[in-house]
Image (cartoon, rainbow, N blue to C red):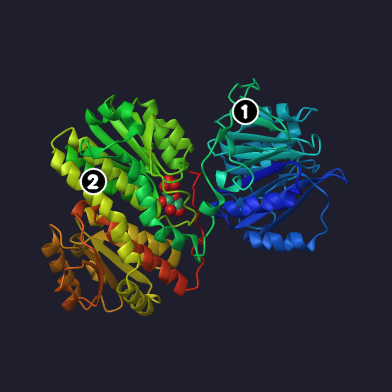
Amino acid sequence: MCGIVGYIGNQNVIGVILEGLKRLEYRGYDSSGISFYCENDKKIEVIKKSGKIKDLVNEIDKRKLCKSHIGIAHTRWATHGEPTDINAHPHTDCTGNIALVHNGIIENYRTLKSFLLDKGHRFKSETDTEVLVHLIEHFYKNDLLEAVKKSLKMVEGTYGILLLSSYEPDTIIAARKGSPLIIGKADGQMIAASDASAIVSLTNQILYMQDNDIARIKKESIEIYNIELEKTSDSDFEQIDLTISQIEKGGYSHFMEKEIFEQPEALTNTFIGRIDFENGTFRLNGIKEKFKDLLNADRIIITACGTSWHSALIGKYLIEKYTNIPVEVDYASEFRYKNPIITEKTVVILVSQSGETADTLAALRESKNKGATTIGICNVVGSTIARETDCGIYTHVGPEIGVASTKAFTAQVLVFFMLSVALGRKKYLTFEDGIKFIKEIQSVPEKIKRILGSQNVFKSLDSIVETNYIKNNFLYLGRGINFPVALEGALKLKEISYIHAEGYPAAEMKHGPIALIDENMPVLFISLKDSIYDKIINNIKEIKARKGYVITIASEDDTEISKIVDKVIYIPKIIEDLSPLLSVIPLQLLAYKTAVKKGLDVDMPRNLAKSVTVE
Ligand code: G6P
């Protein structure tokens, strides 16, 4: 959820950690703060502020800053305590000699706090994090690492922490359990952060910390210990493939806009190296070893959160259609609180753009405990879920920064399609079927480009936005494989436009939502010329008979539909099973344009965060 960054090296620390923070702002943006060691005064200084990072920068600009080459910083998504200046991180101990930033949740903080209050510690904030810094103070006896170890052993919950202390002013201590933390190394400089976007402007040499690792980081060296403070040999840096231009807006007004427009190229990256013309299938090397387990699975369970959960619903549809293997889709947040039926022949697929979502990670660990084979579909290379699953398929669409997911969704759908075809080819799909599917996939980028370049699409969208941006409610309806797209369209609108929107199976609408229909209720249908076209036309007529305002996403050769609806957005024809890749594009744009029209912060919608690393 929150983003943390720490730096030690030859540069002035403030500039480096502020740049890192800005890159991490998508992870949380209700308050932020920095802490650094003043070389002249030999003490720790803390500056923190509620609001966005620009508010922190304004605050910093007002101050006369001392010389410093070591510091830590935090951008927050509040869990315990409102987003005020005081609750912002870093937090300090009673003496002000130790400062700490934390991403995660200390679940037993109440018990720890009353223990510390009894010992005379004074608390300033309402956060769970502050107990940790006081606990370290409590245990500190001239050995910082030992105090951190003793404290972490008492903590229940999750953490990625960075700690700075005037007791050892040349050291940052980092520790992780359940929240991501990576370290980058450059000449005479070290940087630690929640993800690589905060690091790549400095270096591409990255070390992924593992759960229960504690690191002592100095300018030129790093030591990694386990929680017992035994040195681990695992301190290998690896080269990552991420450039600054991939994480900048590149001329677009918002990351979300950039990511929508990137989809033709991004999706090409998802499938291009995986086409196997010779065998009429897709080569998914990442899951080679577990491919047989999938084929022989008694059941596949797909689990995920948010947008990734919507792609999972499409995955179920496709896998069942091409393989006859029963598939279940579960919300990751519910998964471990029931009794998931898992046998040795069950395969669990975890879908996560970030690869760090706490609930999805917990579902993964529960599945492994119960003996399932686990497969990840992740975007972030080297993320926790990607590393902890038995194997996986990367979506390879590059960093997704906009909080509302776009290109990650279409890439996940594409991966599910390739996976279903690859499995289906081992069952009853013919070579010709395989070749046909490859050709259809190859046509996707061009067709998305046509939507994104179509004046008619944009004209229709503008007029829909003009009429409806003031509305309080929206209904999205679809059937079959496009029902999850209706859910996704509704989610996009809620997330960034703050308009209440519901996605529903079009025919189910008669069992409740139809009561909401009047002239003030915009209803968006996905009504492509597919196997259930006639049925959905009937559903449209039911809405029109009740004076509903109907918008529809239609196939470009549908000459009739404009006669019965209020607005049509035409999209190119494609086989039904790939149609979500096209039908979702106007819905992404509709949400985006509505939010822009309303003057809202598209990339940082209120209360949300890109990567939800708390339960
Ligand atoms: C958050 C984001 C959503 C995302 C969901 C799952 O809620 O705001 O956009 O779909 O987390 O994230 P994941 O990284 O696991 O796909």
Residue flagged by tag 1: what amino acid is it? Lys
The three-letter code of the residue at mark 2 reads Ile
Looking at the image, is 174 positioned above or below residue 90? above
- Give me the C-alpha separation between circle 1 and circle 2: 52 Å
Q: Secondary structure at mark 2?
A: helix
Numbered badge on residue 522: none
Q: Is residue 294 left or right of residue 594?
A: left
- Label 1 secondary element: helix
Percent across and percent down for residue 144 are: 75, 30
Q: Residue at x 81, y 39 (%)?
A: 166
Residue 283 is situated, as x and y percent measured from the top left of the image, at 29, 36
State the image quarter where residue 377 is shown. top left
Q: Return the disc, 1 or 2, that comes first in the chain's sequence.
A: 1
Q: Relative to 332, is 577 on the left or the right?
A: left
Task: Residue at 20%, 72% (x, y): give it.
Answer: 543
Task: Tell me: residue 256, above or below residue 210.
Answer: below
Residue 356 x %, y %: 48, 41
420 shown above or below 474: above
407 left or right of 422? right
Residue identifier under label 1 = 153
Residue 466 is drawn in which quadrant?
bottom left
Residue at 73 percent across and 51 percent down: it is: 14
Q: Is residue 295 visible?
A: yes
Name the residue nearer the viewer: 437 or 23: 437
Q: Is mark 2 within 8 Å of ligand 1?
A: no
Q: Residue 84's image quarter?
A: bottom right
Dot 1 and dot 2 residues touching (CB under 8 Å): no
> Where is mark 2, residue-wise?
438
- Spot occupied by residue 488 in the image (x, y as percentages of width and height): 33, 57
The residue positioned 60% from the left and 27% from the top of the image is 235
Q: Say few, some or many: other residues with alpha carbon within 10 Å of mark 1 (under 14 / 14 to 19 / 20 or more).
A: few
Of 306 and 341, nearer the camera is 306
